[in-house]
Image (tube, rainbow, N blue to C red):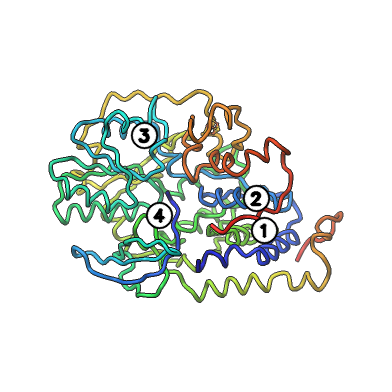
Amino acid sequence: MCLAVPGRVLDIAERDGTRMATVDFGGVQKEVCLEYLPDLRVGEYAIVHVGFALQRLDEESAKQTLELFAELGMLQEEFGDPWELAAGPDEGAGE
Amino acid sequence: MKYIDEFQDPALARRLLDEIHATVTRPWALMEVCGGQTHTIIRHGIDQLLPDQVELIHGPGCPVCVTPLEVIDKALEIASRPGVIFCSFGDMLRVPGTGRDLFRVRSEGGDVRVVYSPLDALTIARQNPDREVVFFGIGFETTAPPNAMTVHQAKKLGIRNFSLLVSHVRVPPAIEAIMLSPSCRVQGFLAAGHVCSVMGVAEYPELAARHRVPIVVTGFEPLDILEGVRRTVRQLERGEHTVENAYARAVRPEGNPAALAMLADVFEVTDRAWRGIGVIPGSGWRLADRYREFDAEHRFQVTGITTQEPAECRSGEVLQGLLKPNECAAFGTVCTPRTPLGATMVSSEGACAAYYLYRRLDLQAAPAAPTTPLEASPVG
Ligand code: SF4
């Protein structure tokens, strides 16, 4: 139940004095309360938990993280197979 | 789906794994705090792909699992009363109280309803002005803001037939308790990302410094877990102990200010008993006095409860990372998700349930046989 998942805001409306949005989760749509992220806009992604948007998902840092992952291990590739290195005695240590 | 698939990419996972293998020189024990992370780890076999020197200890971060038996019994008692509509998240239904569960209460005629959001319970209260509607408000810092907002709305709109049975818990005091335990083996923490989406990271630097333990805020997809492990191991190898944020796409250092303000208005910090663990000082929230009329414990005055845990269940040790679920004699035999002895076998975040779902057959067939389920696993 603690799971929170990213969803995309489809539309925003005021209901009973509460800021609500329709949010799409890969095809499933839910009504979500925006009171904690009042400046969330249509098209943006947010982390949603039990019907509340809790934090904006930052596309820029998502991209940066993935780029960082893609660059990882470039050095190792230059010097051989880290699986072999890791398996060998006292080798493959350090960066 | 966007921001899920990308963080399950097997090729990038391989890079992260290579990097971890290249970094580690000594044995390290890390704890993933959150049960959602435990689930990802077991489902994708991440613990089996890591170097042998890196052990993942499963933490107590399953809110369903740590909700004290006494509170479950209070919930069962309130839900059994005529005139009450008792609303809960679905995974509380089969959590065993003393002798029965909410599922049973419903089959005995109690009006127990599963809701997706606490706001749904408020809607039910408005539609049933002649009934008492109670919402079971459990969870960590992630779930507390939605419940706080719901109580705030009830007060604002004057919905007097609504109340909250509160048993909220907080992560930092649990980390403190784990570090203070004499049997503690944990050397680094993967902190729960969505808790920090709300709370930010301000509570952690002091903990990391005082216990000389790295704390890395970590997300929930396979790549997030691997990145959390990579950064924690890197710190340990370098002798560092700082707070890092490995989940920047969803965690700002300051958290969510609007949610923090609402929490401060609606709740106050209290000591809280954790099921199987005991009382952890300052580890919970209760409703502040100005919201007392919405407190179900106050409204229903449930007393005379005597609780009893099944003797075979060792979930307390599982929750403290002292025992792996499959080391419990009841695991998979007497205790299954359909006939759970402990809450850790019920919840989608419980370690026993995760082992039962994803590892039961492996455990029977070939213990510790390495697999590469990252490639094989379906996209969640
Ligand atoms: S397997 Fe069942 S009995 Fe054993 S610790 Fe887990 S929940 Fe308790």
- How far from the left and from the top, in percent, is residue B38? 56, 48
Residue B114 in the image: above or below residue A28: above
Question: Residue B117 at what x, y percent from top left?
Answer: 32, 52
Q: Amino acid at mark 2?
A: Gly
- Kindly indicate the quadrant of the structure image that contains residue B152: bottom left
Q: Are marks 4 and 1 in contact (CB under 8 Å)?
A: no
Q: Residues within 10 Å of mark 2 (few under 14, many from 20)?
A: many
Q: Chain of mark 4?
A: B
Q: Between A14 and B279, which is closer to the camera in this rendering? A: A14
Q: Tell me which residue sits at (34%, 43%) in the image.
A: B270
Q: Amino acid at mark 1?
A: Glu
Sequence-first tag of 4 and 1: 4
Mark 3 or mark 4, whichever is nearer to me: 3
Q: Are marks 2 and 1 in contact (CB under 8 Å)?
A: no
**Residue marked by disc 4:** B142
Mark 1 and mark 3 in contact? Answer it, CB < 8 Å: no
Say if labels 1 and 3 share a chain: yes
Alpha-carbon span between mark 3 and mark 2: 32 Å
**Is B290 displayed left or right of B165 in the figure?**
left
Mark 4 or 1, closer to the camera: 1
Q: Do badges 3 and 2 share one subunit?
A: yes
What residue is at 86 percent from the left and 56 percent from the top?
Answer: A88
Outermost residue toward the front in this view: A27
Q: Residue at x 28, y 30 (%)?
A: B77
How busy is the neighbourhood of tag 1: few (under 14 within 10 Å), some, or many (20 plus)? some
Q: Is residue B36 left or right of residue B140?
A: right
Task: Identify which amino acid the numbered label 4 is placed on.
Answer: Thr
How far apart, in angstroms, are the residues tagged by discs 4 and 2?
Answer: 26 Å
Q: State the residue position of label 1.
A: B375
Q: Chain of mark 3?
A: B
Q: CA distance from mark 4 to mark 1?
A: 31 Å
What's the chain of the residue with tag 1? B
